[in-house]
Image (tube, coloured by chain):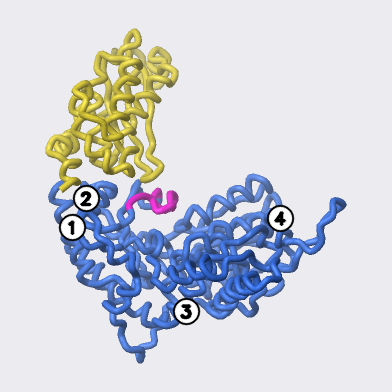
Chain colours: A blue, B yellow
Amino acid sequence: MNAVRVDSSAPPLDVQRVRADFPGLARRINGKPLVYLDNANTAQKPQCVIDAVAAYYTQHNANVSRAVHTLGSEATALYEGTRDKLAQWINAGSREQVVLTSGTTMSINLVAWSWALPRLRAGESIVLTTMEHHANIVPWQLVCERTGATIKVAPITQTGELIIEELFKLLTPEVRLLALTHVSNALGTVNPIALIAAEARKRGITVLVDGSQALPHMAVDVQALGVDFYAFTGHKMFGPTGTGVLWARAGLLDGMPPFLGGGEMIRVVKFSGSTYADPPHRFEAGTPNIAGFIGLGAALDYMQSIGIARIAAAERELLHYATARLLDIPGLRILGQAADKAAVISFLIDGVHAHDLATLIDADGIAVRSGHHCAHPLMQFYGVAATARASLSFYNTTEEVDRCVDALERARKMLA
Amino acid sequence: MAVENLYRQVVLAHNREPKRFGEMPQPTHAGAGENPACGDMLHVALRVDDGRIVDLRFSGEACAVTIAAASMLGDLMVDAGADRLQELRVRFARLLLGEACDPALGELAALAELARHPARHRCALLAFEAVQAALSNAPIDAAAADAARAATTAAGGDR
């Protein structure tokens, strides 16, 4: 399954026009125009998102769901309005299946503590893949330490693709959960989630998908994917930091105890014992990131106005262009050459450390990430400590890719 | 351009041909430093006599800043001990904060531009961390190591 749906009838993107929507892109770094190629880390924010956050603080500032005054109603309507937009965006089924969290990490931890911890037993296991982000490894290790369950790891090929038949072999009767990423943050690989989830469900295994890197690049229909839990983050899809979502298949949240206790998540509190609100509020203790979610609502409106198909098409073009240009650099090797790939390019240059590359090209205003990308096991698989990673968004241009390539060439000549 | 002040010729030269890199046959102490930001690991082996480093060897793959800093620090640590390392560490910290160049830092002073690259401080400090770890670690029992090696090779070893 290729999750990137491209409507070829859509007119192409006017990149200069969309760039004008992002004030951050006008920055100059070290006297040069910024070339922002660290989108997989966090995306730049359009002015409409910044304005929505500012409008909340200047016009509607109040707490949500607990004030009867006008401002409280306005804030609640705006905040809950984002839940509706999110539900529609991912085809959630109902708004009650959309838990608002601080990000993917919290979404996964919520499942670990409220779903996995009460269920898993010694002798049972969780299947992960080699390409997982630490946020989809460590919560499960914490669960295993407490339950005696174990982790099994599905292997990948040198090109960075899951070996599907090996993954299926691991889905044995003692497996309770399969947790895997939709799109690899370090390699760009798009995993065939619908195919994998269908097999896991057939074997009675619950499936959690880390969708952090998928949402910014492609249309995601969680029901069509056939998964049980889908976690993602708002700041990579042009929204504010500290916003995230946990979607759960209908009915799953009902059987889960609260994760964090506090205000907002209760029905009745007595010292003899409290009763809890229904999902999703059961999992939303305390005052949430109100401004952040209002901003995320604006980000969804913005993506809607551009069109996810046009975003995907623009990024696919950029990925092809950047891949070809980068491979012209002598000694450059790309990690991750999956057939289905998002616009993420991890690379190494012979004899040059990624940190030195990133520092040297930053002098030319170019922002890429260097390091292990929170994926130690993947780096161990490839036998490298660190890579440089250029991750592209629809607002990037071929001229920016050219500037990056030129800067990398200069850095290579200096160090190699 | 500021970045060329960091990647100066002396730094690039130390990176290309780092001093005291390689294996040491019979170290008395060993340690390592790790940079969690990139996963780089720098190992160091020391031969220590009466609290003074007689010889040292670094190993590992790391960025130019880490390699150059290790190569430069090695020069300053031969015939010196833990007190010297501590003193250099304090002087180097001042350099990272942008204070005036300190001749006591020798070639390490060439890394002064790091004051403008806080994200890279850890790279340069890795060598200090590794040597500190090696000096803090319990000495390697050379006699026991020799005995173990002798037991697994033919009688009448090569000593």
Residue A226 locus on image (x, y percent): 59, 75
Would you say the residues marked 4 and 2 are in contact, meaning their CB atoms lie under 8 Å apart? no
The three-letter amino acid code for the residue at tag 1 is Ala
Task: Tell me the chain of label 1.
Answer: A
Which residue occupies 65% across, 50% down? A149
Q: Indicate left or right for A25 with A199 as reference.
A: left
| Mark 3 crowd level (few <14, some 14–19, many ≥20, 10 Å Cα) | some
| Residue range (magenta) | A370-380
* Residue corresponding to mark 2: A360
Task: Tell me the chain of label 3.
Answer: A
Residue B50 locus on image (x, y percent): 34, 8
**Residue B102 lies in the magenta stretch:** no
First along the sequence among labels 4 and 2? 4
Where residue A407 is drawn, which disc sits there? 1
| Residue A238 visible (yes or no) | yes
| Mark 2 crowd level (few <14, some 14–19, many ≥20, 10 Å Cα) | many
Q: Nearer the viewer, mark 1 or mark 3?
A: 3
First along the sequence among labels 1 and 2? 2
Question: Tag 1, which secondary structure?
Answer: helix
Which residue occupies 20% across, 70% down? A399
Q: Nearer the viewer, mark 4 or mark 1?
A: 4
The three-letter amino acid code for the residue at tag 3 is Asp
Question: Tag 3, which secondary structure?
Answer: helix
- Asked if residue B81 is positioned above or below residue B12 in the image, the reply reads above
Looking at the rendered structure, whether the residues under marks 3 and 4 are on a common chain is answered as yes
Residue A51 locus on image (x, y percent): 44, 71
First along the sequence among labels 4 and 1? 4
Would you say the residues marked 3 and 2 are in contact, meaning their CB atoms lie under 8 Å apart? no
